[in-house]
Structure formats: C-alpha cells, structure tokens
Image: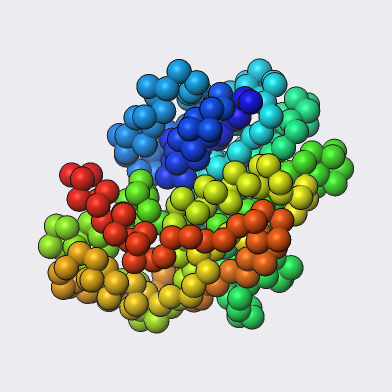
Amino acid sequence: MKVVVTGAAGFIGSHLVDRLLGEGHDVAGVDAFVDFYPRAAKEANLRAARDHPRFRLVEGRLQDIPLDGLLEGAGQVYHLAAQAGVRSSWGRDFQVYTDHNVLATQRLLEAAVHAGVPRLVNASSSSVYGDRLELPLREDAACRPLSPYGVTKLAAEHLASLYERNHGLPVVSLRYFTVYGPRQRPDMAFHRFLSAARDGAPVHVFGDGKQTRDFTYVDDIVTATRRAGDSGRPGCVYNVGGGQRVSLEEVLRTIEQVTGGKLAVTRDEAQKGDMRDTFADTTAARRDLGFRSTVTLPEGLAREWDWIRGER
C-alpha cells in the first residue's frame, strides 16, 4: 500500500521508512530538514531509501506544502515530524515548537480527514507525563509536563483525540520512552557518551546520575509503530518502552563495558524540564499491539557503538 511518513529523514523516521520499504510498501517521506542538527546526518539516514524505487521524498514543512495530493490514496500515515529537544524549548524558541509540533499536526489532521485516511499514527513522548507520578507510568495518569516541549507534544495528542472523536479519524498516539540506537541525534545522551568514549573526550552528565529512564531500542520502537498502524485501537494512547528502569550511573558502567574503556565523567547541573524518573507500563501495548521489547540495553548499546565508530 501507499504509506506516508512525516519526519522521514529523522532518527526514528528513517528506520521506519526502511522497515516499510522492506515490507514492499510504496513510501512517500516528508521532511523539512530543519537545522536542529546538521542536514548531512539526515541525508545519511536516507541513503538506502533514496536508492529504492518505491521511495519518494517530499521536502518541506507540513505547514506549507500541499497535503491533499500527498495523502490521497494513502493506507497509513505515520506522523513523526516534530521539533525535538526538551532543554531548547524554553524562551523565544518556544514559537518554533508550537509551529512544528502543534500547528503542523493540526494541518495534517485536517488534511487526513479530507483525504479519508484509513489510519494515522501520531508519535508522542514520555515527556508529557512530568514528575511525581506513580511508577510505572500508565496512560491514564494525569499529565503535567515539565517542559514546553512536553506541553506541545501533549497538545498534539489532544488534537489527535479531538479529530478521532469529532471527525472519526482513526488515529492512535504512541508515547515513546527514551529511544536510542544507530542514527540517534547528536544532542542525545547516548550519542554524546559514545562519541566521547570514541574520541577520548570528557562525558558531560546533567544531574547526580541517579535519575532513571526506560530506554527503548529503535528497532523495538519501529515494531510498535508498525503494529499501531495495523491494529491500534482508534482514539487510544499507548506507552512504548524498553521494559527496564535503569539509572544513568548504570548506563555509564554499561558503556564502559561495551567500549572497553574508562569514561572521564564531568558533572553539570540538572537541566530545567528534565524528568527525574520514567518507566513505562506497557500493558496496553502488549494487549492491543502484541508488543514486547526484544533488545536489551547492553545489546542495543553495542549496536550503537558500532555505528558511532563507523560514523567518523
């Protein structure tokens, strides 16, 4: 079938594109190539897809490009385009986040209703939850985001829900928990840590290192995303997590084991907007999507380490 992927040149989006092409689908990828990180990295993400006869790239912002023709005849739409980054979403840059994460999502939802899209999957984030919640985090918990980024992702979820209830658009939202793996953005922790290990540079850690995360390997994220496109219940929100709560200190020890070297750790102040702990209750994803994480943290870090070493 014809499938549309927004944010196709990004970390997760490019992996999803490769999976869809491998399954034999025709894929129209959309990406604005915003300058949050170098364009060359995104071009490298799409290297294999660009050579595939079933792939077509549309460059531009969802706020600007014609969407009716793009969505016409699409069996599924995966909306992964967003302005990423918790720490950079404060101040004047907040307008960038509302533009890319809220306004762009609303325009895509409107176009999907008009085109009669059979299924739309909206990528959200564990950043919508905030702190002081009971762990593991359940989808029905009260969401109190700690960052402007989290606010915009929650707003996009609410928009998706509104279009499902009022227009019958079959939309599903997925809350991704701390995704890592090859092609990870250069600003993300594992990319920074592994690059520092490769280059013999100091590792900068925000906070005391005791904060915990539910780290999820990118292939598991793509599997859950595809299953949401096939069997997710319209109007539902699903957590997608790796199934294990790990502290940052444990991550650093695992990286030393994977890389075979000692890290020189420099501690910096905790950043505004960073959640203290995350851990996903994935009961709903197991029930409706048949999802279970399959890649352990040491295995996933070893794969990203191989990619980091080859990136140079």
Q: What x and y, as percent, mark residue 299?
A: 35, 62
Which residue sits at x=52%, y=61%? 293
Which residue is outermost to the left?
200
Q: Quadrant of residue 125?
A: bottom right
Asked whether residue 161 appears in the rendered view, the answer is no
- Count the labels in the image: 0
Which of 209/311 is in front?
A: 311
Which residue sits at x=67%, y=53%? 289
Q: What x and y, as percent, mark residue 66?
A: 63, 21
26 w.r.t. 91: above or below: above
Q: What x and y, as percent, mark residue 310?
A: 21, 45
Which of 25/3 is in front?
A: 25
Which of 65/292 is in front?
A: 292
Asked whether residue 280 appears in the rendered view, the answer is yes
21 w.r.t. 204: above or below: above
Which residue is outermost to the right?
166
Q: What x and y, as percent, mark residue 301?
A: 32, 61
